Image (tube, rainbow, N blue to C red):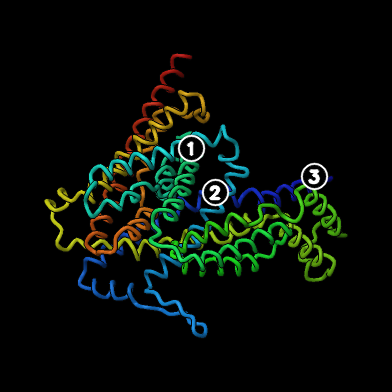
Amino acid sequence: MPKSYKSLTSALVADYIVRPAESFFKKEASSSVLLLLASFMAVAWANSALAPFYHDLLHTHFTLELGEYQISKSLVHWINDGLMTYFIFIVGLEIKREILVGELSTPRSALLPVVAALGGMLVPGAIYFALNRGTPYAGGWGIPMATDIAFALGAIAVFGRKLPLGLRVFLSAFAIADDLGAVVIIAVFYTKGIVWSYLIICLFFVAGLALANLLWIRWTLLYALLGLGIWVAVLGSGVHPTVAGFVVAMFIPARGKYDTDRFVNKVKEIMDEFQCEEQSCGYSILLDRGHLNAVHALEVACHEVETPLQRLEHSLHPWVAFVLLPLFAFANAGLSLEGMSLTSIVHQPLTLGVTLGLFLGKPIGIALFSFLAVKTGIAMLPAEVRWSHIIGAGMLGGIGFTMSLFVSGLSFVSPELLNYAKLGILLGSILSAIAGIAFLAWYCARLGKRKEKASVQAH
């Protein structure tokens, strides 16, 4: 194969296969800026003279009606129950990809982040429950158990290449495992009652997804229609409807119509069509029908080799990261400080439980369980990652913003309790971010001085 064909083929493979997965985390980190701005805007609006308008807007009802069937919800519920399904769907695609080919694909590589995520859920939940046992707030134990991957990766991105790649992978993997745990908790513990007839209907739609996957169907619209049916059925069953997003994600095909080898050969055949008499083809696509057909064939080849899982993740993730999540933050982060005082906050076990669960429980649980996993020999630290890195990542794991706000909305109906929960989430997340960044900055500086000193001694 000529060198030009090889370079073009490599570029196409990178553009359509490798880069979508790699760019996921870059987009996740950069979206944290919008999340932060949306949160500040919500808090400012909720405490301004226009606060009634903010609450009235969020509780404006919208109705979808089809014959005698209708779904009527407030704007904030459409965001939390409807749009957030896409977020859970993206989380599901991400988890499936990691299980198939990523850091969760082998027991050896998956055990450390999975065990770390388990510790990062159990210890914060235990701290919260210990402070709220026997109170009306005990049901909020799931709030401090989540890690916000966008903010956590945004914080670690501050260090650029100063931190080892293995630490970023570890943080990403345990945050993904953490998200899976959060989905399970929502499905199992925050379901008040089940309407079995709707759940049976849901199973029929799921069987349709499984059959479509088995028959090698790659038509995205079919999966979208079956997914909509699952969402409606789950909504009627009493299980939180966002769980439908995760279920659908598990059945999205992870293989293209043909493999990369066939794609490379196909590209070579297509590129043979580009023969120009002069040194440069210029804008021959406007004049040469064969060149236009070759370009179309290239487009089809790229579509056929790309997996539906990667295509959906690549196309939907920018909308979820840069539109949906900031919208969710704006609708849910509106903490009203009216009637709150320092005394009431200090004596409020709900706020203390969430704050301490995130700020102390997360790093303790993540570091402790990781240490036990490595020392018992069931897992190993990633390359160039040290225990101080794990402690710093554990601190950043205490940034529990998005999922914590989501679970708080499922835990409490009272606006007053929701405000105390949101305050705990904001305090715990801010303290965790500051502590994690400061600790890692200190350790990077210390490590840099050690390397510099060793270099001087070597010369």
Q: Residues within 10 Å of mark 2 (few under 14, many from 20)?
A: many
Specify the label residue 3 is tagged with.
3
Q: Residue furthest front?
A: 196
Evaluate if marks 1 and 2 touch, with contact meaning CB atoms under 8 Å apart: no
Question: In the rendered structure, which disc, 3 or 2, sits on the residue that comes first in sequence?
Answer: 3
Evaluate if marks 3 and 2 touch, with contact meaning CB atoms under 8 Å apart: no
Image position, residue 15 (x, y; %): 66, 52
Q: Amino acid at mark 3?
A: Lys
Q: Amino acid at mark 1?
A: Pro
Q: Residue 423, relative to residue 220: is it above or below?
A: above
Q: Residue 119, relative to residue 253: is it above or below?
A: above
Q: Amino acid at mark 2?
A: Ile
Query: Element under label 2?
Result: helix
Is residue 369 visible to the viewer in this orientation of the structure?
Answer: yes
* Residue at point 39%, 53% (across, down): 189
For disc 2, the marked residue is 95
* Residue at point 33%, 51% (across, down): 143
Q: How many marks?
A: 3
Image position, residue 235 (x, y; %): 47, 67
For disc 1, the marked residue is 113
On the picture, is 157 further left or further right than 142?
right
Q: Residues within 10 Å of mark 3 (few under 14, many from 20)?
A: few
Disc 3 or disc 1, which is closer to the eye?
1
